[in-house]
Image: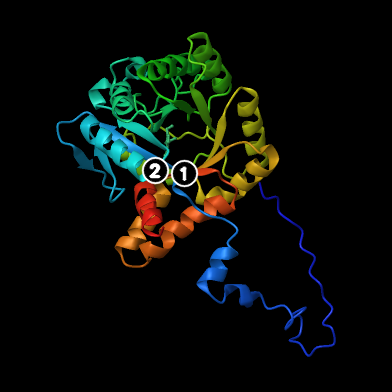
């Protein structure tokens, strides 16, 4: 963990002629270390490695192996066979883990997300197939109801449309147990209900799943940057209202530390900040405050922004993709959930 160091900036100019206000120039020339590639590499403070990557993928029950997602060029929904192939490719490149998300058939969605808790649902079948084919690849799965509810919320609602915290947790527990039985390595509660991490931890342990990890979406903001994801899982047209009564206010930073503290106390093994690039300040505060494994999610909207500019020829993919990912490491993240994971892993391999 690199705490921000306070740098003493000397002001004496040692009697040398100097540019006004430039301190120790010309004895100290910051550019000297940048003069050649070897020296820039030697002096690099942070590095991105394939070990830092978690690859979110989208699943769909379909005969067609891949169906494109309009708002995420280059990302497809995969059927289970294609997802297994993708998992094999990820493992081959050395990516530690994938995070699958389902596009659930609209006919299977209902107000309580009842499909979420079924052992035979798309997620459970995909997790089992992936773990069977690629046991060494980590599989991280969301606990949240939004892909399964007819209203698109992460929990269940009362008759006035308010999210019922504790009732939602009861369902999230069952969803987590179904995913654990299917063989998931890690549950990732992304619902932002109060107390869900502790409740899921207790239930997993009681059922004999002490080894199943929890990576909590600890500081998850009510963000506009999730738009393309909601296209990918088919909730953008169905979501009634917004998620501001459970996801965090983008104006807040101290509150993120309270959220993270609670999740750690409730048994989270890893914590996540989401979205990514607009919230790098939160990543840094979380890492400095708690020194626990800290992850950032470069979300669908961040991917879409970069891809839109890349597709228009306005940004150079060979520069901006890795630069954006490195920013997470610089901010203190231990790893990044990114739709660029496969691309980044290939770039890292090619640069070796
Ligand atoms: C579901 C969930 C969301 C994302 C991950 N899990 C969307 C949301 O909360 O509405 C967003 C991921 C992305 O935008 O890439 N709870």
Q: Is 43 left or right of 127, judged from the image as shown?
A: right
- Give the total of numbered labels: 2
Q: Residue 318's quadrant in the figure?
A: bottom left
Gap in Å between the C-alphas at discs 2 and 1?
A: 7 Å
Q: Is residue 128 above or below residue 95?
A: above
Q: Is residue 29 above or below residue 159?
A: below
* Contact check, label 2 and label 1, Cβ < 8 Å: yes
Q: Residue 89's quadrant in the figure?
A: top left
Q: Residue lying farthest left?
A: 63
In this rendering, does residue 219 appear at all?
A: no
Reading the chain from its start, which is encountered first: label 2 or label 1?
Answer: 1
Say which residue label 1 marks.
51
Report if the beta carbon of the residue with label 2 is closer than 8 angstroms to ligand 1. Answer: no
Where in the figure is residue 264, as x and y percent of width and height? 63, 28
Seen from the viewer's position, the closer of residues 158 and 46 is 46
- Residue pictured at 73% horizontal, 81% vertical: 25
Q: Is 70 left or right of 218, judged from the image as shown?
A: left
Where in the figure is residue 177, as x and y percent of width and height? 43, 15
């Amino acid at each position: 963990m690199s705490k921000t160091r306070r740098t003493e900036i000397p002001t004496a100019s040692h009697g040398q002629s100097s540019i006004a206000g430039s301190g120790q120039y010309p004895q100290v020339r910051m550019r000297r270390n940048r003069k050649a590639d070897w020296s820039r590499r030697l002096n690099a403070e942070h590095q991105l490695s394939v070990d830092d990557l978690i690859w979110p993928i989208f699943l769909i029950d379909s005969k067609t192996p891949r169906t494109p997602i309009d708002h995420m060029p280059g990302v497809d929904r995969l059927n289970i066979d294609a997802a297994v192939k993708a998992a094999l490719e990820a493992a081959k490149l050395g990516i530690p883990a994938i995070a699958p998300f389902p596009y659930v058939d609209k006919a299977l969605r209902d107000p309580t997300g009842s499909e979420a808790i079924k052992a035979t649902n798309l997620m459970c079948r995909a997790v089992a197939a992936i773990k069977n084919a690629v046991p060494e690849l980590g599989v991280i799965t969301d606990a949240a109801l939004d892909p399964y509810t007819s209203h698109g919320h992460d929990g269940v609602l009362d008759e006035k449309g308010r999210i019922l915290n504790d009732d939602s947790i009861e369902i999230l527990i069952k969803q987590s147990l179904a995913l654990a039985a299917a063989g998931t390595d890690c549950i990732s509660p992304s619902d932002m209900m109060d107390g869900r991490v502790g409740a899921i931890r207790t239930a997993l342990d009681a059922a004999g799943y002490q080894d199943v990890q929890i990576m909590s979406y600890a500081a998850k903001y009510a963000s506009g940057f999730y738009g393309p994801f909601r296209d990918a899982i088919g909730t953008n047209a169905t979501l009634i209202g917004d998620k501001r009564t459970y996801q965090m206010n983008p104006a807040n930073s101290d509150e993120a530390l309270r959220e993270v503290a609670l999740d750690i106390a409730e048994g989270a093994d890893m914590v996540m900040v989401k979205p990514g690039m607009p919230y790098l300040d939160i990543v840094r505060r979380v890492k400095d405050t708690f020194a626990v494994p800290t992850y950032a999610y470069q979300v669908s909207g961040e991917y879409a922004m970069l891809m839109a500019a890349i597709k228009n020829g306005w940004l150079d993919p060979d520069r901006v993709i890795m630069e954006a990912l490195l920013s997470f490491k610089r901010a203190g993240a231990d790893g990044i959930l990114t739709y660029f994971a496969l691309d980044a892993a290939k770039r890292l391999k090619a640069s070796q």
